[in-house]
Image: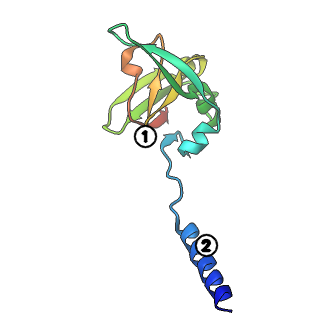
Amino acid sequence: MKKIQLSIITLVILALLAACAPAAEPVLSVGTKSYTRAELEAFGTTSADYTNKDGETTTYEGVLLSALLADAGAADAGGEVVFVATDGYEATLPAKEALACADCIVAFDSESLLTVMPEMSSKLQVKDLVEIKLD
């Protein structure tokens, strides 16, 4: 009888702990939508190479920017997209260019996100990305 009671108490405690686990926090806002890292990864990942001003090439893994923007409702956007970093830095790109870029991604970099925009201005390579505004 004591073993059954102990088992029931253990199960109740485990259930309470599981219910109290923090929900995944959104890591990126795009327009009016927010995404967790798991939701971003669910888009499927692709790689993109970026060559810096010193000629060093790095390969990044991430989500296609065009797919993310389309999911957030920017497919018909005629304005601009604004990439916002945690420190307040902003970079702006016409929405049509962002949607048309076949190799632009929002990349996973350790615990943060960044834009990887091959063949575009280095000013568009935004580290610690937290928001994409749709203007």
Q: Amino acid at mark 1?
A: Glu
Q: Is residue 122 left or right of residue 21?
A: left
As helix, strand or loop, the secondary structure at mark 2 comes to: helix
Task: Tell which circle, 1 or 2, labels the residue nearer the N-terminal end.
Answer: 2
Q: Amino acid at mark 2?
A: Ala
Mark 1 and 2 residues: CB-CB less than 8 Å, in contact? no
- Residue identified by numbered label 1: 111
Q: Which mark's residue is nearer the viewer, 1 or 2?
A: 2
Q: Is residue 80 above or below residue 6?
A: above
- Residue identified by numbered label 2: 15
Q: Is residue 49 visible?
A: yes
Q: Is residue 103 above or below residue 134?
A: above
Of residue 133 and residue 10, the one placed in the foreground of this image is 10
Quadrant in which residue 6 is drawn: bottom right
Crowd band around label 2 with a 10 angstrom C-alpha radius: few (<14), some (14–19), many (20+): few
State the residue at coordinates (57%, 19%).
96
As helix, strand or loop, the secondary structure at mark 1 comes to: loop
State the residue at coordinates (43%, 36%).
110
State the residue at coordinates (37%, 16%).
122
